[in-house]
Image (tube, rainbow, N blue to C red):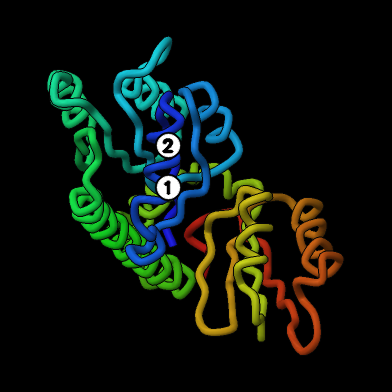
Amino acid sequence: MYSVLIIDDEYMILKGLEKIIKWSDYGFEVVKSARNAKQALEYLSTNEINLIITDVNMPKINGLEFVKIAKEQGHQFEFMILSGYQEFDYVRTGLKLGAVDYILKPIDANALVEALKKVKHKLDSQIVMRQDSRTSLNLQIKKLFENDLDKNQIVALFHQLRINPELIGHGLTVIACNRVDDTERIDHLCDEYGQVLKFSQGRVIDIGFIGGRGKLLKFVRELEDRQIITGESFITVGETVYDWNNIS
């Protein structure tokens, strides 16, 4: 279910949009309605949103200014704009900013549904692309650990992962977490420690841990203390190397 944030300074339009269709029938859920851009930005500061539907003509910060501010702050979302017939200049600017579609007031339920179908198709495609990218990256790292990449491929992989090869001079140790049922929790811990050199296969996740022995031992203890490694699962820690040519 994709999350939706609706912004309009007119209360009746907000409530009408929430009820005009059954959002879940089209794969969406309205999680927040805001009366102005300030409220919307406050919500975005602590929440991720897939789709924003915003009125263009609002006091202080209009809808298009809001979109620019939100994107400058690093928020990622698709957006549609609401406008009146006399506001086509806003619509044109919104489309240039990347709006998926626009909806004219008074809002027609069928037009809204058609616009949502377009957005859902785009969001679904993005998920497939991200999954394909993760699969490709997973395979590349696996090949690195198996010494199956040439120098140029390794340089390209490190560039993609934003790894400075010189960091490996601090030490790189391959850790295998075996018989793991929840690799997502290991991924979260890796994110906390800034570890991006990892690949998973079935119930095994291999991590090319970059850092000294002290940092490595702390990481391993965290895996145990947080009970990420429990039951029949276990950790295998390899030899520390200091040159990326010796990773395998």
Give the mark count. Answer: 2
Taking the image as shown, residue 65 lies to the left or right of residue 94, namely right
* Rendering quarter of residue 216: bottom right
Q: Residue at x 77, y 89 (%)?
A: 232
Taking the image as shown, residue 234 lies to the left or right of residue 10, namely right
SS at mark 1 in the image: helix
Label at residue 14: 2
Q: Provide residue 16's location: percent of width, then percent of height.
A: 39, 42
* Rendering quarter of residue 183: bottom right
Taking the image as shown, residue 80 lies to the left or right of residue 15, namely left
Q: Provide residue 88's location: percent of width, then percent of height.
A: 13, 23
User: Label 2 to label 1, Cα distance in Å?
Assistant: 6 Å
* Rendering quarter of residue 179: bottom right
Task: Residue type at mark 2: give it.
Answer: Leu
Task: Residue type at mark 1: give it.
Answer: Glu
Q: Provide residue 245's location: percent of width, then percent of height.
A: 47, 60
The image quadrant where one finds the N terminus is bottom left
116, above or below 78, in the image: below
Q: Residue at x 77, y 66 (%)?
A: 223
Q: Are marks 2 and 1 in contact (CB under 8 Å)?
A: yes
168, above or below 53, in the image: below
Taking the image as shown, residue 96 lies to the left or right of residue 195, namely left
- Residue at image mark 1: 18
